[in-house]
Structure formats: C-alpha cells, structure tokens
Image (cartoon, rainbow, N blue to C red):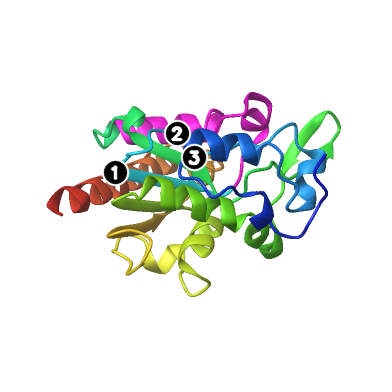
Amino acid sequence: MATETDTAAEFVPASLSLAKLRRAAAECRGCPLWKDATQTVFGAGPRKAELMLVGEQPGDREDVEGEPFVGPAGGILARALEGADIDAGDVYLTNAVKHFKWRARGKRRLHQTPRAGEVEACRPWLEAELKAVRPTGLLALGATAARALYGPSVRVTRDRGQLIDSPLAPVALLTVHPSAILRLRDRDEREDALASLVDDLRLLASSVAKG
C-alpha cells in the first residue's frame, strides 16, 4: 500500500499511455481526499482528442461509477455538446481533482470545493493528461478548473467568451461549470445559461477548426 504524501508527483509514471496513467492514479495517495472517496476518477476519452474539457472534481455519481461527468452535471454537458454539434465521443473529459470531496448530511454526500492545496497536489495528473492528449482546444469548466489551468489571475465572469493565451493548448477558453446551471431554479434562466454554454463550446470548436 502506497503511503500518503502532499503531492501526486511520485505516483505519476513516466508514460504517455492513458491506460497506464489511469491504473497508476487508482493508487494515488497524493492528498487526504482518497480516504473518503470510493475510488479515483481519472479522465476519459480518446488519446488523440482535439478537445479537452476540464471540470473541478468528481461528484457523487462519478465517485461511485469511476467515470467523469456521468452525473446530473454530465447530463447538462452532454446536452450542450449536442447543441454545439460536438461529438461527445471525440472529447477528452477530466477534472482538476480526481477524488470526490464531500461532507455528510444525513444519508446524502454533499459536494465541497477542493482547497487550493488539494488542487495543487493533484496537478501532476492533469499535467500528465495534457502531455498525453495534447489537445488543440482546452476548455476550463468553472473557477477551480480555470485557476488550475490558467492561474489565479483569470476570472470566469470577466474572461468567459474570449480566447486565453496559454502554453497548454493553441486554443484555450473558460466557461461556467455545468453544475452552476443545475443550481438555477428558474427554468428560463437555466435555458439561457445552457445556451451560453453551447455558445462557448461552439467558440471552442470553431477556433480549433480555424487552426
């Protein structure tokens, strides 16, 4: 059994194989979040994906099933990808943090936002995925992912809808996390927010297509 550290770096193999990275990530003890999680939730999608979408962390469903974006937020993202005419099977999906951080409320497990140190501890996995996939288009979903990818100076509310200069990919953008759309109670507001997410995905795809 691997011992716990304060970074995932020593658990990351020198490999560009996503299968090997996923197997190694299952044994990661790079931060305390593994203790309360069911399993590591690594990224999923083709190695040669042009588009890579990065969220915050797995949710309850993802933690149980071991795959990213299979819960309610994933359903919103799937609708948005379809609306933007992007084949979900061609996209690599992952999260900045690979373990579900939660607190109990009765029988429910409620999401908790990862701390900066937890995001930083998990960063070597995200860097390994970026090296393996080498996406042309990179989209951060939400503030945590945006900070993990682009640094603390970016703001979703300010920088959304415009290209970001990043060494991580030729085309880089950020947008809201699909879970933010789920939290909107008004149906019209949810539909407007979904339409805006579709617009951001279209911008990503069109900018990649332009080369």
Q: CA distance from mark 3 to mark 1?
A: 34 Å
Q: Which residue is mark 3?
A: 186
Please tell me whether mark 2 or mark 3 is closer to you in this view: 2
Is residue 44 rendered to the left or right of residue 144? left
The answer to which image quadrant residue 79 occupies is: top left
Residue at 45% x, 33% y is 76
> Is the residue marked by circle 3 packed among few (<14), some (14-19), or many (20+) residues within 10 Å?
few
Give me the disc on residue 50.
1
SS of the residue under disc 1: loop
Amino acid residing under circle 1: Glu
Q: Which residue is mark 2?
A: 76
Residue 103 seen from this side: no
Residue at 32% x, 69% y is 165
The answer to which image quadrant residue 116 occupies is: bottom right
> Is the residue marked by circle 2 packed among few (<14), some (14-19), or many (20+) residues within 10 Å?
some
Is residue 184 rendered to the left or right of residue 26? left
Question: Which portion, as a residue range, is magenta?
Answer: 57-82
Q: Are marks 2 and 1 in contact (CB under 8 Å)?
A: no
